[in-house]
Image (cartoon, helix red, strand yellow):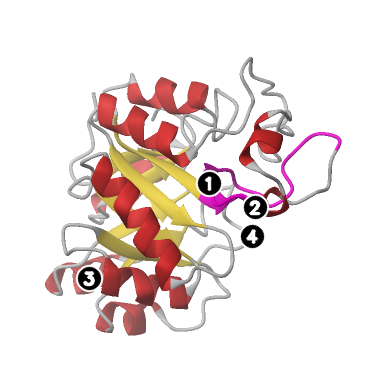
């Protein structure tokens, strides 16, 4: 069970430190663990407009063709490349899952779906379509939308109901300051400067910022925290979510 006082654990791309990331195997492994509050994934769409869960635009072994130039059937026939962070994990079912399959896992295990709008070019129509799928699975009260793209975040806040928290992803190249995003009404999902998998792009996270967010009724999520000691430090300053590749 999760022993943290404040921070709820989110499985980054599923249980990606132990299973092939962004696969049904990884999602189910996270779903089966009581430690996790939510399961995070990244969303692209195919040439025939099927939403899929994958982190990179050209994720397939032996092919540099982007997923958005393939049909879902074509993408499904290919094998995914190993993760850059965890190349030793090969998996047994490393094929691309549909977004609907991911939602089914989250619903079955009663986990919050943490959905990164990864691909560039999210129109209002695409976000409406995504929202409709989430509603179809009765997950609008157990979903969080995250993105680095300011325009996708703005459109999401307009389209999704208030039951869906919309979090601006933050790294050292973000266009505005953390407080400016909070003042605009967005919760934050911040890359941690002191965690090895995010240290090159991460920023400092201080209790003052966490308190500032909470006074506004907003939340602080932190990625990707793979060490228990660092997770405990973040929990002590009151962060709301801790996104990790492992069971901490």
Q: Which residue is mark 4?
A: 200
- Foreground residue among 162 and 246: 162
Tag nearer the camera, 4 or 1: 1
The alpha-carbon separation of the residues under discs 3 and 4 comes to 24 Å
Asked if marks 1 and 3 touch (Cβ < 8 Å), the reply is: no
| Residues rendered magenta in the picture | 43-62
Q: Which mark is residue 213?
A: 3
In the rendered image, the quadrant that contains the N terminus is: top left
Q: Residues within 10 Å of mark 1 (few under 14, many from 20)?
A: some
Left or right relative to 226: residue 164: left
Between marks 1 and 3, how big is the CA–CA gap?
35 Å
Q: Main secondary structure of the magenta part?
A: loop
Mark 2 residue crowding within 10 angstroms, few (<14) / some (14–19) / many (20+): some
Residue pointed to by mark 2: 47
- The disc placed on residue 162 is none
Where is residue 182 drawn, in percent x and y? Answer: 28, 77
Q: Which quadrant holds the C terminus? A: top left
Question: Label 2, label 3: how many angstroms apart (C-alpha)?
Answer: 39 Å
Q: Nearer the viewer, mark 2 or mark 4?
A: 2
Under circle 2, the secondary element is loop
Q: Nearer the viewer, mark 2 or mark 3?
A: 2
Residues marked 2 and 4 touching at CB (< 8 Å): no
Q: Residue at x 47, y 44 (%)?
A: 41
Q: Residue furthest right?
A: 62
**Per the image, is 75 magenta?**
no
Instruction: Assess whether mark 4 and mark 3 are in contact (beta carbons under 8 angstroms).
Output: no
Q: Decide if residue 7 is in sight here.
A: no
Above/below status of 127 relative to 109 = below
Gap between marks 1 and 2 measured at Cα: 8 Å
């Amino acid at each position: 069970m999760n022993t943290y006082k404040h921070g709820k654990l989110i499985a980054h791309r599923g249980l990606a430190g132990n299973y092939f990331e962004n696969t049904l195997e990884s999602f189910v492994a996270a779903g089966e663990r009581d430690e996790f509050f939510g399961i995070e994934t990244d969303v692209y769409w195919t040439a025939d407009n099927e939403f899929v869960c994958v982190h990179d635009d050209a994720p397939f072994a032996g092919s540099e063709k982007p997923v958005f130039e393939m049909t879902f059937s074509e993408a499904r026939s290919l094998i995914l490349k190993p993760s850059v962070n965890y190349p030793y994990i090969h998996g047994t079912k490393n094929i691309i899952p549909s977004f609907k399959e991911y939602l089914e896992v989250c619903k079955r295990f009663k986990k919050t779906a943490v959905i990164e709008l990864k691909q560039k070019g999210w129109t209002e129509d695409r976000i409406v379509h995504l929202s409709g799928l989430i509603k179809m699975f009765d997950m609008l009260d157990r979903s969080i939308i995250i993105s680095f793209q300011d325009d996708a975040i703005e459109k999401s806040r307009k389209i999704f109901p208030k039951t869906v928290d919309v979090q601006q992803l933050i790294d050292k190249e973000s266009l505005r300051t953390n407080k400016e995003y909070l003042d605009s009404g967005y919760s934050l999902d911040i890359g941690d400067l002191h965690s090895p998998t995010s240290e090159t792009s991460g920023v400092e996270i201080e209790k003052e910022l966490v308190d500032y967010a909470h006074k506004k009724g907003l939340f602080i999520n932190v990625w990707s925290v793979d060490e228990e000691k660092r997770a405990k430090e973040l929990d002590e300053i009151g962060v709301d979510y801790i996104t990790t590749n492992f069971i901490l």
